[in-house]
Amino acid sequence: MKHTFSVLVENRAGVLSRIAGLFARRAFNIESLAVGITEDPAFSRVTIVAEGSDYTVEQVEKQLNKLIDVIKVRTINPAELISRELVLIKVNAGQTERSDIMNIAEIMDAKILDISRATMTLELADTSERIDLFTELLRPFAIREIARTGTVALQKGTDTISVKK
């Protein structure tokens, strides 16, 4: 089962390395990892998506809480999760394919970022499932390049994981 961890950490060098090392020692594969500053630049939010048993998740959460630079850890229940990824995709796009690609972009709510004589570059920020679908829809046009971010996530509702409570 996939689990999403939201980890609030002090914004210091080496913190990400210690977190990744903890996952590696537990042989817990990280599927997605995203880091960015929070509302307070002294702190960063690390969003980690990993596959594992409930027991392993519990152990990893306990170990994360023991790391010095970790302020708070929360495993977000999938039913309470708002998550997004970003993908940039460059596809072959001759004159005859452009209208089909533009239709796919419109249906998926993607943006066209660049058009050249031979290619189009598109952007989509959405759930991982919709990004997978978008990628599959563009595959027949010969994908030349993909850049995909890790998942960023927040919990629905008024509950927060922040320095300020």
Image (cartoon, rainbow, N blue to C red):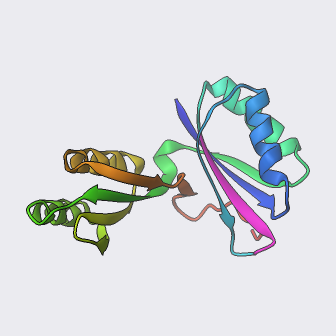
How many labels sit on residues? 0
Q: Position of residue 77 (x, y in %)?
A: 55, 43
Farthest-out residue, right: 68
> Looking at this view, is 20 or 50 the one in front?
20
- Give, as a single range, the part of the protein colored magenta: 41-49
Horizontally, is 78 left or right of 126 in the view?
A: right
Q: Is residue 107 magenta?
A: no
Q: Position of residue 111 (x, y in %)?
A: 30, 70
Q: Quadrant of the C terminus?
A: bottom right
Q: With respect to residue 141, does 103 lie above or below?
A: below
Residue at 81%, 64% in the rendered image: 11
Q: Position of residue 30 (x, y in %)?
A: 62, 37
> Looking at this view, is 90 or 157 the one in front?
90
Farthest-out residue, front: 117
User: Residue 42 falls in which quadrant of the image?
Assistant: bottom right
Residue at 85%, 62% in the rendered image: 12
User: Residue 162 falls in which quadrant of the image?
Assistant: bottom right
Q: With respect to residue 62, does 54 lie above or below?
A: above
Q: Main secondary structure of the magenta part?
A: strand
Horizontally, is 47 left or right of 122 in the view?
A: right
Horizontally, is 96 left or right of 90 in the view?
A: left
Residue at 53%, 62% in the rendered image: 157
> Looking at this view, is 140 or 71 the one in front?
140
Q: Position of residue 153 (x, y in %)?
A: 55, 56
> Looking at this view, is 44 or 105 the one in front?
105
User: Residue 87 falls in which quadrant of the image?
Assistant: bottom left
Q: With respect to residue 78, does 70 lie above or below?
A: below
Residue at 41%, 48% in the rendered image: 128
